[in-house]
Image: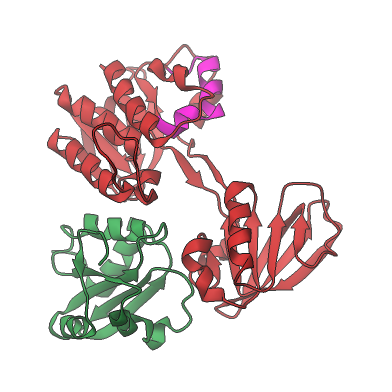
Chain colours: A green, B red
């Protein structure tokens, strides 16, 4: 389990259910490394600004991570973390590697709309 | 439309120095806003374990960042992250105006600059396009994606050397490209000392680098799938530079510098020019600063603000 204050997804079923029943979901799949930590920190800070988005993380080294790793959209990714934005169960956007708070915020605005 | 915010003190940079300074200013009952271009925590955020903080046996940088943030907020400090300060101007009444990237203006009687250091990149516009698709800043994090594949490490210093050693066990070949040093011939299988990268190439995914020797006499193209950038860090001192250019002005009032930025040559120049009232910070010059000193500096600096 990752040492963040985000909601952790620990099984593939849990992840599948979440993206099916929740309109806007962001999953950041990584490790507790220097490229991933700033993204988790950005997500923690954005949680209050975007109550209409479920911001979650997933350990890259658990079996459940195949849910993210096996997405066709992530096939060419070569940097942690893999971040996937799901809208109504479908992939709306993806990124690989470190992202700033501003970059994450911009993608959320585009994929899910700004908070009302 | 621009919005405006006024506080007695504005701290720029929410690393350990900025957060601890803001906490102390807030604790003294002064209105304080701290602004940060990215997320709070600064470089301490990615420190795996801190074992020299008084009273705490061990704590991760990620957790300590969160604690410092909460502490500042509990002292009524307004925290604004994800918005970069782009200009800092002082008027004739010694009032400072800070304009953020979003267009927001902030006004204050004093400013604490704690912008620290930032990572240097290749300077090539296409670098961001290949982030996660060949370009990486962490061999330890991403090296396993390139097992048995050709990669290059670009930069200099300890991080560069460690990355080369780390990747050498998995990747084949590992090119070392370093802009510094005596220009080599480029005939070596893997070492390009005194060379720099002029272009990244690929069809969505990185596949090659264009190189040029520093004397501009030689050019090469090498095929790689990964590029690990280790160009080091530099002071994030853009906001300070206009003040340095006005070196003939009398000493500024209300401008304080702390944290890693205070440990750089920039501050030595600043003090020499009389631009800044840097409080006790001169005592830290030329000293190796670690995270603990940064925390103390932030608190020390706050004492001098009011």
Q: Would residue B2 be seen by someone viewing this image from the given angle? A: no
Q: Position of residue B255 (x, y in %)?
A: 37, 22
A1, A25: nearer the viewer: A1
Secondary structure mostly seen in magenta is helix
Q: Is residue B213 highlighted in magenta?
A: no
Q: Residue at x 49, y 37 (%)?
A: B238
B191, B107: nearer the viewer: B191
Pick out the residue farthest to the front: B57
Q: Quadrant of the image for the C terminus of chain B?
A: top left
Where is residue B70, by image quadrant? top left
Q: Is residue B264 highlighted in magenta?
A: yes
Answer left or right for B147 relative to B118: right
Q: Would residue A47 be seen by someone viewing this image from the given angle? A: yes
B50, A6: nearer the viewer: B50
Q: Residue at x 14, y 23 (%)?
A: B29
B48, A77: nearer the viewer: B48
Q: Position of residue B132 (x, y in %)?
A: 48, 70
Question: From the viewer's perspective, is residue B200 above or below residue A77?
Answer: above
Question: From the viewer's perspective, is residue A69 above or below residue B188?
Answer: below
Where is residue A91, by image quadrant? bottom left
Answer left or right for B9 relative to B250: left
Q: How many marks?
A: 0
Q: Position of residue B288 (x, y in %)?
A: 50, 30
Answer left or right for B78 relative to B265: left
| Magenta segment | B259-276
Where is residue A36, by image quadrant? bottom left
Q: Position of residue B253 (x, y in %)?
A: 37, 16
């Amino acid at each position: 389990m990752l040492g963040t204050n985000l909601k952790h997804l620990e099984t593939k079923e849990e992840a599948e259910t979440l993206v099916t029943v929740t309109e806007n979901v962001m999953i950041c799949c990584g490790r507790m490394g220097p490229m991933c930590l700033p993204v988790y920190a950005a997500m923690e800070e954005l949680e209050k600004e975007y109550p209409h988005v479920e911001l979650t993380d997933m350990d890259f080294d658990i079996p459940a991570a195949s849910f993210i790793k096996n997405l066709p959209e992530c096939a060419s990714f070569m940097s942690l973390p893999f971040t996937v934005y799901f809208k109504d169960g479908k992939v709306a956007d993806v990124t690989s590697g470190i992202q700033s708070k501003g970059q994450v915020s911009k993608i959320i605005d585009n994929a899910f709309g700004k908070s009302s | 439309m621009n919005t405006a915010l006024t506080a007695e003190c504005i701290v720029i940079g929410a690393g350990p120095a900025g957060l601890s300074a803001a906490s102390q200013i807030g604790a003294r009952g002064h209105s304080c806003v701290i602004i940060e271009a990215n997320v709070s925590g600064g470089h301490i955020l990615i420190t795996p374990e801190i074992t020299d903080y008084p009273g705490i046996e061990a704590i991760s940088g990620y957790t300590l960042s969160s604690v410092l943030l909460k502490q500042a907020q509990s002292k009524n400090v307004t925290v604004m992250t994800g918005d970069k300060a782009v200009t800092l101007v002082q008027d004739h009444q010694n009032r400072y105006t800070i304009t953020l990237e979003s267009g927001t203006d902030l006004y204050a009687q004093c400013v604490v600059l704690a912008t620290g250091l930032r990572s240097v990149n290749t300077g090539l516009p296409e670098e961001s396009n290949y982030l996660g698709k060949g370009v990486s800043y962490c061999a330890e994090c991403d090296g396993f994606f390139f097992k048995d594949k050709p990669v290059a490490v670009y930069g200099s210093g300890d991080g560069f050397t460690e990355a080369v050693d780390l990747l050498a066990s998995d990747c084949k070949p590992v090119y070392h490209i370093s802009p510094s040093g005596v220009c080599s011939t480029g005939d070596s299988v893997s070492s390009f000392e005194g060379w720099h990268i002029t272009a990244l190439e690929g069809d969505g995914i990185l596949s090659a680098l264009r190189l040029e020797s520093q004397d501009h006499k030689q050019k090469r193209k090498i095929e790689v799938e990964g590029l690990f950038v280790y160009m080091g860090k530099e002071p994030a001192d853009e906001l300070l530079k206009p003040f340095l250019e006005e070196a003939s002005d009398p000493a500024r009032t209300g401008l304080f510098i702390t944290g890693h930025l205070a440990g750089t040559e920039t501050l030595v120049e600043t003090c020499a020019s009389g631009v800044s009232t840097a409080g006790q910070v001169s005592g830290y010059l030329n000293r190796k600063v670690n995270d603990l000193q940064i925390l103390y500096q932030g608190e020390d600096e706050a004492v001098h603000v009011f």
